[in-house]
Image (tube, rainbow, N blue to C red):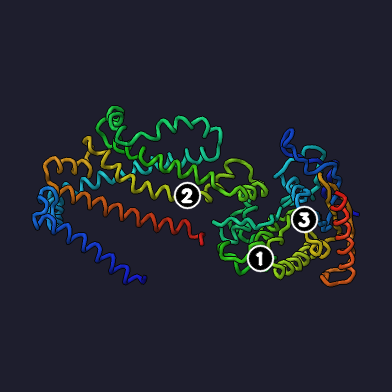
Amino acid sequence: MSEPVIEFRDLGLAYGQGEARTVILAGLDLTVARGEVLVIVGESGVGKSTLLRVLIGLARPSSGTVRVAARPGCRTPMALVFQDARLLPWRRVVDNVAFGLEGGGLSKAERRAEARKGLALVGLADLAGRWPHQLSGGQRQRVAIARALAVEPDVLLMDEPFSALDSFTREGLQDELQRITAQTGKTVVFVTHDIDEAVTLADRVVVLAGKPGRVAAEVRIDLPRPRKRRDDALQAIARQLRAELSRRSAEL
Amino acid sequence: MNLVRSTLLAAAGLAAFLLFWEAMPRLGLVDPAFLPPPSTIPAAFLREVALGVWPLAVASSLSHYVVGLGVGAGAGIGLGLVSGMSRPFEAVTAWVVRLLRPIPGLAWVPFAIIWFGVQPSAAVFIIAIGVFWIVFFATQGAVRGVDRDLIEVAQAFGFRSPLARLTKILLPAATPGILVGLRTALGQAWMAVVAAEIFGVPGVGQRMMQASSLLSTDIVVVYMLTMAALYGLFDSAFVALQGRLLRWRP
């Protein structure tokens, strides 16, 4: 395994005080290697999204350490794709994608040129001039992915990015993400509760379980890409993960 | 209902209203001195223009209106944004706001005269106060109502300072709400113009007061219609601007 980009050590996170105190995560150790697609699965409320929020600075851990060793000279260490696209409705598609580049010393024309590259990567170059409300749900989420890619993050964080989409669109975007990661060699941390999605995308799947959440199981998937969803080996891994998850939830 | 039909109905409604108005004094149902028939208005209007009174009054009132609206709306948006963004600021000002808010513009007239004299700045002050509260509350509410998820987007992309939050998210997201307040203020400010001018600052309001004390009700009506026309003009222009600013909305 190459050098870790992200390293969680004994991470804990809790909200509130006294009676109202809720412990989300405790004693969590996890590393992410450069260039790998790490998929975190687990039930709702187990703290999967919280891990991403800690990385992007939207949540603060109560204990433990997070070490991020981004490539020196990279434009942004990390960018996050939210579960819902969260486009800014008052900006045209191209300016939504350029959003993260503002304040980086680029001129408006340069930012738009970068944004168009990002849009081309997700196959939406034609829609640059549209308003977000004119897009379908799938298109909106692709714009959100382009917005994250445009800042050239060392690590791409994705928080259940396809869960609100219909299954047809979802599988299309999964294939697209496989293509993009193959093309860019980007490190990806992807959170989902969909096992099939996890095994399709992941180099490594980490199962988060328990209350508070910690790493309960880990599976490396070395199957060749692009992967077929109905592949027997993939299905076998999915079955193994499902069994693991149901065993974990039965224990609780 | 199609456009032609609704336009015809609107024209018919207006015609019926004018006919009724014309008939009341003509049939002797009311004294023409109390209610001048609309047919006498154009002549009264031409008299006022020929005297040179109308253009002066309108120009003077327009300058009060525009400056008062600008000052009041500017202060309302500015303080509304601060109050919407900062809970401590809102807490500090909560009771001051409750104290000052219910005071009507007219009640400020004595202070306006003492502070500014019988000057255009006094009229501007009265108008600005009327406008301020409407815009202030609209802005504060609009900022409070901004989707927290969008603020997180800005944070996730590294825009964490209050200024970045304001310019990247809060201001554009609050614009629809602020514009609603501004449009209300556009009408409110014309009402304030009359109040602001009754104590002698030249303008439409002052001329109406002079005319009414002489029972020249036709002249009063001329200026009522003048204000309606100016309001219509400003409101139409504002709606066009609003449509342009909010063209991103479905």
> Where is residue B86 shown, x and y percent of the image?
55, 37
Q: Which residue is mark 1?
A: A138
- Which residue lies at the image location 54% right of the left edge and 44% below the top edge? B144
Q: Residue furthest top?
A: B114
Estimate how packed mark 3 is, as few (under 14), some (14 to 19) or many (20 or more) residues with alpha carbons within 10 Å: many
Q: Type of residue at label 2?
A: Gly
Horizontal side, residue A205 vs residue B219: left or right: right
Estimate how packed mark 2 is, as few (under 14), some (14 to 19) or many (20 or more) residues with alpha carbons within 10 Å: some
Q: Which residue is mark 2?
A: B177
Q: Type of residue at label 1?
A: Gly
Separation of marks 2 and 3 at Cα, in angstroms: 36 Å
Q: Which residue is mark 3?
A: A191
Circles 2 and 1: CB distance less than 8 Å?
Answer: no
- Which residue lies at the image location 52% right of the left edge and 40% below the top edge? B84
What chain letter is assigned to the residue under label 3?
A
Circles 1 and 3: CB distance less than 8 Å?
Answer: no
- Please tell me the numbered disc located at residue A150: none
Q: In which quarter of the view is residue B102 placed?
A: top left
What chain letter is assigned to the residue under label 1?
A
Horizontal side, residue A250 vs residue B22: left or right: right
